[in-house]
Image: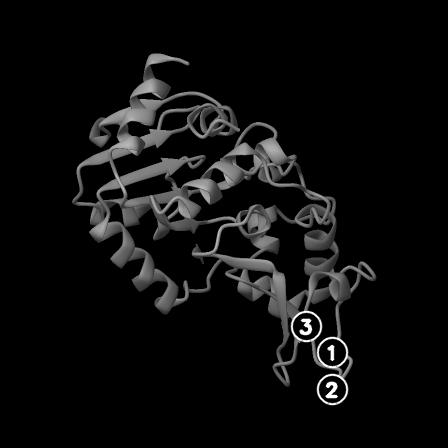
Amino acid sequence: MSKAVDELKKIIDDSDNIVFFGGAGVSTESGIPDFRSEKGIYSAVSEYGYNPETILSHSFFMRNKEIFFKYYKKNLLYPDAKPNNAHYGLAKLENMGKLKAVITQNIDDLHQKAGSKNVLELHGTLYRNYCMKCGKTFDLDYVTKDDGITLCDSCGGVVRPDVVLYEEGLDQGVLMSAVKYISNADVLIVGGTSLAVYPAAGLINYFKGRKLVLINKSVTPYDSKADLIVNENIGEVFAQICDL
C-alpha cells in the first residue's frame, strides 16, 4: 500500500460522513471507455461525418434521430459491463454507514449493480428510457433489440434515453441534492474525473468539510485545493482500502 493510499485509508477510518463524486474514469476498469482521453469515445472520428459531441446534442437529436440512435447504440451501450472494485468498494463503505452518497457523471448503472443505494445521477442513465409522446418507460433490453430509432409499443412515439444531452440542463432536483450532500460532507472523495465538465465540476466549490481527496491518473484544475492526491488506478485503490 502506497503512502497516499495509506493516508486515504486513515481519512476514511476517521469519518462517517463521506461523499464520493465520480466521473468516467471510475468505469474504465470495467471496459467502458471514457470520453476525453487518447482512447476515449471522443477521440474516434465519427463514421457519420459529425463529431461525437455534435451527435450527442439536443438539437442534433431532434433533427437527425436516425444517426443519433445508430451512433449511441453502437458507441455508448455496454450492457455486459460489470462493476469493478471502485464500485464495490463504494457500496461497501455505504453499507458500513460511512458513505452518505455517490454522485456520478456516469450513465452506466454500475454503481447500482455493485449495490450502492443512494446514487445521484447528474447526467441520467441509459438504463431508463421513455416515450417522448406518452411517457411510457422502457428498459435497456427494449432499446437494444435493433440499431435504429426506438419507437414506443403503445403509441409509436420516439423512445429516448433518460440522459442529459449537450444543450440540455441538468435535473435541478438531482443537482440541488448533490449540492446538499457535498456542502454537509466531512470528507469529499473525487475520483475518475478530469473536472473539466461544468456545471458538474463546479460542485466541488460547495465543499466546506475537513478533507478533499482527488483520485485521478492525470492532473486536474483542483489539485491545488486538495488535501490528498492519489495518482493511481481507482479500482486498485478501493481494493486495498476496502479489503476486496
**Which residue sits furthest front?**
96
In the image, 18 versus 171, the foreground residue is 18
Q: Residue at x 37, y 39 (%)?
A: 195
Q: Would you say the residues marked 3 and 1 are in contact, meaning their CB atoms lie under 8 Å apart?
A: yes
Residue type of the residue flagged with mark 2: Cys
Q: Would you say the residues marked 3 and 2 are in contact, meaning their CB atoms lie under 8 Å apart?
A: no
Visible residue check, residue 222: no
**Which residue sits furthest top?**
2
Q: Which residue is mark 1?
A: 152
Pointer 3 or 1: first along the chain: 1
Q: Residue at x 37, y 20 (%)?
A: 5
- The picture places residue 223, in percent across and down from the top left corner, at 28, 28
Q: In the displayed structure, would residue 53 be above or below residue 126?
A: above
Label 1 – label 2 distance at C-alpha = 6 Å
- The picture places residue 178, in percent across and down from the top left corner, at 33, 56
Q: Which residue is mark 2?
A: 155
